[in-house]
Amino acid sequence: MSLLGGSEPEFDAVDEYVPEHVPEPGAFLADHDVLAGEDHVAVHQHTRDAFEEHGVYDATFGYNLARLNLDPRHPDAGFRYAEEADDPATLRAEFTPTTAFCPQAEPLAVGAFRAFDAVDDLGYDLVRVRVDPSLNGSEAVNDRLERLESGDSDPVAVDERPDAAREGPPDVAHGGSPDDGESGPTSPF
């Protein structure tokens, strides 16, 4: 039984590739060797293990993020993979969230990157992770993922970002507004 009172869907088997239940490859995978069938399944099983080991869980659904590919309720969401055309030792992983305004997309994509980066048995020298352009604010999220990948910058804590200059919540009692903060790809709503 589901947390919302409905019945749990019948998930695809972990060793099964169902093209209708995975997102279409997006711009990040264009012009590269997109994995399908057994190749996709093999990489995705390693993905599931890496996410399990490093705690990459979707809080909304309460499961390992890799299970999203097996959830028939969200056929346009999950991960697709491709080997880079010029360097087959580099894997590209593109995450498509369930909605264009998914508040967890950035932390999930960063968590996926860190999990991929932490495992040695994936079979690739480098894994590059991006979110699909369908996500509102995908440019900012992908810029952060690119910086993490290159090692040019460390992730910045939310309260250390330049756009979060004030400390603590707004002082509503003294004229501050609860809407003083900016919304964007890293804000929860």
Image (cartoon, helix red, strand yellow):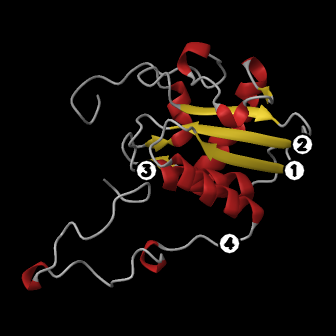
Residue 100, percent from left and from top: 42, 38
Q: Does 139 sit above or below residue 153?
A: above
Q: Which mark is first along the chain, 2 or 3?
A: 2
Tell me the CA gap for discs 1 and 3: 27 Å
Q: Look at the numbered disc 2 and give the secondary structure of its residue.
A: loop
Q: Which mark is first along the chain, 3 or 4?
A: 3
Tell me the CA gap for discs 4 and 3: 21 Å
Q: Which mark is first along the chain, 4 or 1?
A: 1
Residue 128, percent from left and from top: 73, 48
Q: Amino acid at mark 2?
A: Ala
The residue at 16%/72% (across/down) is 177
Label drawn at residue 125: 1
Quadrant location of the N terminus in the rendered image:
top left
Residue 17, percent from left and from top: 65, 18
Q: Look at the numbered disc 1 and give the secondary structure of its residue.
A: loop
- In this picture, residue 29 sits left or right of residue 90: left
- Say which quarter of the image contains residue 47: top right
Q: Amino acid at mark 4?
A: Ser
Query: Mark 2 highlights which residue?
Result: 89
Disc 4 vs disc 3: Cβ atoms closer than 8 Å? no
Tell me the CA gap for discs 2 and 1: 5 Å
The mark closer to the camera, 4 or 3, is: 4
Disc 1 vs disc 3: Cβ atoms closer than 8 Å? no
Q: Amino acid at mark 1?
A: Asp
The residue closer to the viewer here, 145 or 116, is: 145
Q: Look at the numbered disc 3 and give the secondary structure of its residue.
A: loop
